[in-house]
Amino acid sequence: MLLAVVSLFAACSSDDDFNTKEATVSFASDSVVTKESAGIVNIPISVTGVRNGNVTVTVKAEEEGVNPAKEDVNYMITSKTINIKADTLASGTMNVEVKMVDDSEINDNRTFKLTIVSANGAKIEGNASTIVTIRDNDAAFYEKFFGKWNLSGNIQSSSGVSAFSKDVTISGETDETADDYDHVLTVSAPGFINVGASIDCEFHLNYNFDLATKKGTIGIVCGEVIATYGSSYEWMWVTDNGVSYTTDDVTAPWALGENDAFPTTITFPASKSLYFYQPGAGAWRILTDLKLTKK
């Protein structure tokens, strides 16, 4: 059973315990955005004014919008009655604790409304209601790329061609308001290339996904510095167009599988080469037949 979590709480035994000073309660914001995968979320109610007794607030939940979230299906509220004790402070916070239900269904964002329906020991002012939007993480496949992967293929040096397999970590932007969110991923690859010394690499992937077709692309970004050694060496990825080097992305397609299953393997075109390139000196290594495998 979930326990109600509030900034300060106490059961009120009688009306004599309630606040008699001037105090108001209001949702801290008229809207809240959270993720389906967020787990337990605290939605704050602001209490303003000095209190000489307890304040108790009761809330209700209602379906809202064209794709409403359903209580006890898409979310659960721990308790709809929340208490805060007397305090000499001029402000305080109590929280409505909501547990999000994480399903595997791809759907539009869902919404519901919380409303303060009564308050003992305070007046309801400001935001009596707040609209909660639950963002669907099953359609946000960008974040599903985060984690451990293996990058494998063939690598060519002056001594010939050999197979390689390296563990890498893919991360990305978590702030949904940031420009890179849902667009750019970062690959961290320690000890990825050996050129007489083991070279750590970090490079970017351009991410794209179309929910309507359930298909996307991942493109290795070329033309950016991805590795350095001392103050004298730096390298970047480049590719070629059959005639000369270019800084076009090396791009692989991917798609959801049966029942919208996320792919565990992404294969880059065999015809594309990725050059570990030092400006002014040329290519030190050539990578081909690249494949990303989820670990």
Image: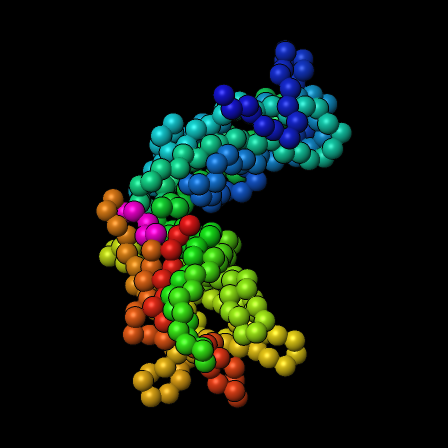
Q: Is residue 93 visible?
A: yes
Residue 97's x, y, as percent?
52, 30
Q: Classify 186 as above or below 147.
A: below
Magenta segment boundaries in residue numbering:
260-264
Q: Quadrant of residue 46?
A: top right
Residue 172's x, y, as percent?
49, 57
Judge by depth and name the residue closer to the eye, 155 or 107: 155
Lateral position of residue 154 relative to residue 130, left or right: left
Residue 6's x, y, as percent?
61, 29
Residue 279's x, y, as percent?
52, 84
Q: What residue is shown at x 31% (from left), y 85% (from top)?
A: 242
Residue at the farthest front position = 159
Q: Classify 281 as above or below 123.
A: below
Principal secondary structure, stretch drawn in magenta: loop
Q: Classify 175 as above or below 127.
A: below
Q: What residue is shown at x 39% (from left), y 73% (from top)?
A: 161
Q: Quadrant of residue 182?
A: bottom left
